[in-house]
Amino acid sequence: MKNKKIAVFALLAFVVAAFLFGMKAYQRSTQTVQEQKATQQSDRLVRMHSPVLGPQNAPVTIVEFLDPACETCRAFYPLVKQLMAQYPQEVRLVVRYAPFHQGSDQVIQLLEASKAQNKYWPVLESVLAAQPLWADHGNPNIGLAYKAAEQGGLDLQKALADAAAPTIDAVLRQDVEDLTALGVNKTPTFFVNGRPLPSFGEAQLTALVAEEVAKARK
């Protein structure tokens, strides 16, 4: 009986090890493919319409594909701001949209419309802060997202009228086209100077930014 238990535990350990090895191999493969796509199609990382926070000539660019309804995007936003505060002259953030969740496209259109009032960043932060109230993935309450945007200082009625412009639809279509071409299938997805994270996580993002900053300082 004892030998049988040992054999079972050994088999389980082998299965777990094989699974972990397979996951790591898959992550490496995915990263390699995504990095190749980003290298071959670097123009798809940053567009003229993309919101930029930080120095325009910063040597390190974090491109983030985000969904305003994504809980992990909300959780990562303070870390991104922390990295920018840590490297104020060396890092800039470029936001791209990945409207994977229901209702996200409407919120994105409002975010784009907020640019006309110079309210983009406070509105984004307000919408993210209120996300738990409105971002039910099955039944989002977009009205509460709009209310949060208004609390961020937005003239809501003007922004809703501006959001109907064909140019804003074009922005959303371009971002979706770019994320598809780059193989982005989850949010947030980060590229640092064109490099995807080796695997997903806060430590990985922090380390990759530090590595690129160190290169720029040489």
Image (cartoon, grey):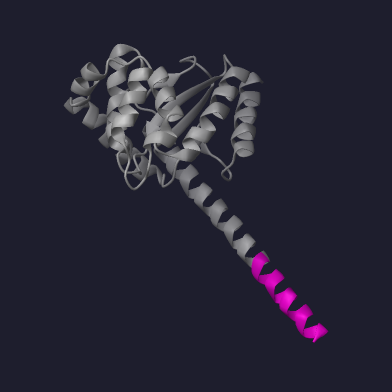
Judge whether residue 7 is colored magenta. Answer: yes
Choose between 171 and 161: the one closer to the eye: 161
Judge whether residue 200 is colored magenta. Answer: no
Quarter holding residue 105: top left
Q: For residue 3, say whether it is visible.
A: yes
Residue at the image point whose x is 34% and y is 30% from the top: 145
**Most common secondary structure along the magenta stretch:** helix
Q: Looking at the picture, how far across and down is residue 191, in whole percent?
A: 50, 35
Q: Looking at the picture, how far across and down is residue 10, in whole percent?
A: 74, 75
Quadrant of the rendering where the C terminus is positioned: top right
Left/right of residue 59 with respect to residue 125 in the rendered view: right
Choose between 85 and 37: the one closer to the eye: 85
Image position of 98 with respect to 108: above or below: below
Provide the residue span drawn in magenta.
1-16
Q: Looking at the picture, how far across and down is residue 166, in whole percent?
A: 17, 28
Choose between 147 and 91: the one closer to the eye: 147
Q: For residue 188, say whether it is visible.
A: no
Image position of 57 with respect to 73: above or below: above
Q: Looking at the picture, how far across and down is residue 65, in whole percent?
A: 42, 35
